Amino acid sequence: MISKRLGPLSPYKTETTPSRIKLSSNELAIDFPEEVRRRIAEEVSKIPFNRYPDPEARALREAIAQRFSIKEENILLGNGSDELIYYLSIGIGEFDRGIFYPTPTFSMYGISAQVLGRDRVEVPLREDFDIDITESLKVLREKRPSLAYFAYPNNPTGNCFSEDKIRRIREEGIFIVVDEAYYHYSGKTFLDEALRRDDTVVLRTLSKIGMAGLRVGFMVGKEEIVRELSKIRLPFNITFPSQVIATLMLTEFYHILEAEIKKVVEERQRVYEELLKLEGIKPYPSEANFILFKSLAMPAELLHKRMVEEGVLVRNFSYMIPQCLRVSIGKPEENDAFLEAIHKVLKNS
Ligand SMILES: *Cc1c(COP(=O)(O)O)cnc(C)c1O
């Protein structure tokens, strides 16, 4: 019999409406240059496809360690950080103790808790999308969860929570996971604490910096934590092609991605300022590669639909935050197309 735990769940859905311009999944909008594609093809053609890949993915871990100035023994690799969220929800604390996270946030924290039958301890964010510390402390003392997730910056709101509030919550004796999927766009990190402390780890991913298709995420934490969680890691969770391509991108071609990331940060400011000028739209400040905005003049549902008709796909988050949509920052010309489309849709409403 299928577990009762699965009843309330539904398979992960993403925005798949075909569209000329796709600004719905926070991907990096880079087309790898031809020379990069040729090098990738060359390296991939050397893979012995009949063989299992290196279970430890040593070359990739070394490349990550070098690139981000950490040590290999502090890195646990996942098939996307999504997989690591499962590992953490399985491996940290007992199942009779809950998982804490502020909402709205990334859906995988709640899904992993539900799949495992762990209590979901949710506390709504304040109006300004920061943590409500009074309410959080109250709920922590009542429900005694043993694991907490903080998306930092938060998805879909785009802001970083106050660091001191995250630390204050940790003082209650809970293990914290700081999910830094958008680190490259915020520059803010808990890495030092993750390397020093027994109650803190950091999650990172290659997905938001141009390699979403490879499914590579990593956790950074003390060697003992990495060693213990490695016991539940599925063998060969990083495919051979992903190991080869990610290693290549992080070594030979990282400068290309870096330049693109820098452009996104500049474009984020421009798009934010342009949205501010629009009557009927309220954009929220962002430290990530996307901007959340509220539709004040027309239903978010309708705005989303009209934008699709204009060939621009954004993500409708009104089911989570009333009247809100999220746009990923793309190439300058894609952002222009987005701004033109929203201008037109609002004018004709
Ligand atoms: C996109 C995202 C992830 C998922 O990253 P993958 O490495 O692609 O699984 C994790 N956390 C947050 C907050 C995200 O927005």
Image (tube, helix red, strand yellow):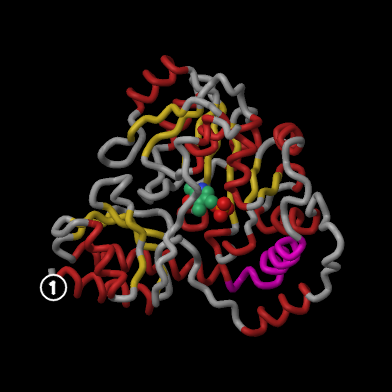
Tag 1: amino acid: Asn
Quarter the N terminus occupies: top right
Give the answer, above or below, for where 146 lies relative to 7: above
> Looking at this rendering, what residue extends furthest in the top direction?
142
The residue at which mark 1 appears reads as 348
Residues in magenta?
240-256
Q: Residue at x 66, y 72 (%)?
A: 253
Give the answer, above or below, for where 252 lies relative to 290: below
To which quarter of the image does residue 166 belong? top left
Residue 342 horizontal side relative to residue 317, left or right:
left
- Callout 1: CB less than 8 Å from ligand 1: no
In magenta segment, residue 244: yes
Quarter the C terminus occupies: bottom left
Give the answer, above or below, for where 339 lies relative to 314: below
Give the answer, above or below, for where 272 lies relative to 150: below
User: Residue 165's x, y, as percent?
Assistant: 41, 31
User: Residue 250's x, y, as percent?
Assistant: 67, 64
